[in-house]
């Protein structure tokens, strides 16, 4: 958790203080905006919309509850609920302009945070119920969907790269307790996973 916290603090400090990383970030962002097929990059960016990501998490919550899990679905829902409580005040405080607008409130990315927590929590909730050869696919799918969202957000010009990275660092911190809870519960139950 400490490395993620340090990376999040460094990223936030660089953006807030107009540090050298911010300048590099904005040059890199300008260089890639508009690249890639517009329809595909828009689709990827939309993976971070609440209308897309929250139903995925909702299905995972229901499945985990049906399978007998109690604590992990509650922790996952609370983690998702923490996203706007943390991201919105940070956006207001940092007041970073976006790549294609003078409007502010772009750091950290709410869409990247929504995707990271929704897909990450869904993977953590569902992994215990996947058959052994396929259980590795849950976290891989979560990483791919989260990464695809970030790429879409940057290529469409909705966010700077560090807006996305900062969200991922923050969400890694948020997801770590849920992951530890699921892991410790799986170890304690030899019969059925009940995270």
Image: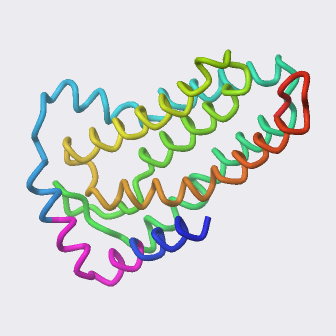
Could you say which is closer to the camera, residue 151 or residue 138?
Answer: 138
In terms of secondary structure, what is the magenta stretch mainly? helix
From the top left corner, tell me how far across and down residue 60 is, in percent.
67, 24
Residue drawn where x is 28% and y is 53% of the image: 159
In this view, 48 is above or below 107: above
- Specify whether 98 is left or right of 188: left
Residue drawn where x is 71% and y is 41% of the image: 76
Write down the region rendered in magenta: 12-26
In this view, 195 is above or below 94: above
Q: Residue 38's quadrant in the figure?
A: top left
- Specify whether 144 is left or right of 184: left
From the top left corner, tell me how far across and down residue 44 is, in percent.
31, 31
> Which part of the image, by quadrant, shows the N terminus?
bottom right
User: Does 16 appear in magenta?
Assistant: yes
From the top left corner, tell me how far across and down residue 17 is, in percent.
33, 84
- Specify whether 80 is left or right of 104: right
């Amino acid at each position: 958790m400490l490395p993620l916290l340090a990376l999040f603090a460094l990223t936030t400090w660089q953006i807030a203080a107009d540090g050298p990383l911010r300048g590099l970030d904005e040059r890199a962002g300008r260089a890639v905006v508009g690249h890639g097929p517009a329809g595909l990059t828009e689709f990827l960016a939309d993976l971070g919309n609440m209308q897309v990501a929250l139903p995925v998490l909702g299905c995972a919550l229901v499945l985990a509850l049906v399978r007998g899990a109690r604590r992990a679905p509650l922790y996952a829902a609370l983690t998702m609920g923490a996203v706007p409580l943390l991201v919105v005040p940070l956006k207001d405080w940092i007041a970073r302009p976006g790549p294609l607008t003078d409007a502010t409130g772009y750091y950290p990315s709410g869409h990247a945070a929504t995707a990271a927590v929704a897909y990450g929590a869904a993977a953590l909730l569902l992994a215990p119920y996947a058959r052994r050869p396929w259980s590795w696919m849950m976290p891989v799918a979560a990483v791919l969907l989260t990464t695809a969202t970030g790429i879409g957000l940057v290529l469409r010009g909705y966010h700077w790269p560090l807006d996305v990275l900062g969200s991922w660092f923050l969400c890694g911190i948020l997801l770590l307790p849920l992951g530890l809870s699921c892991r410790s519960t799986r170890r304690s139950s030899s019969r059925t996973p009940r995270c």
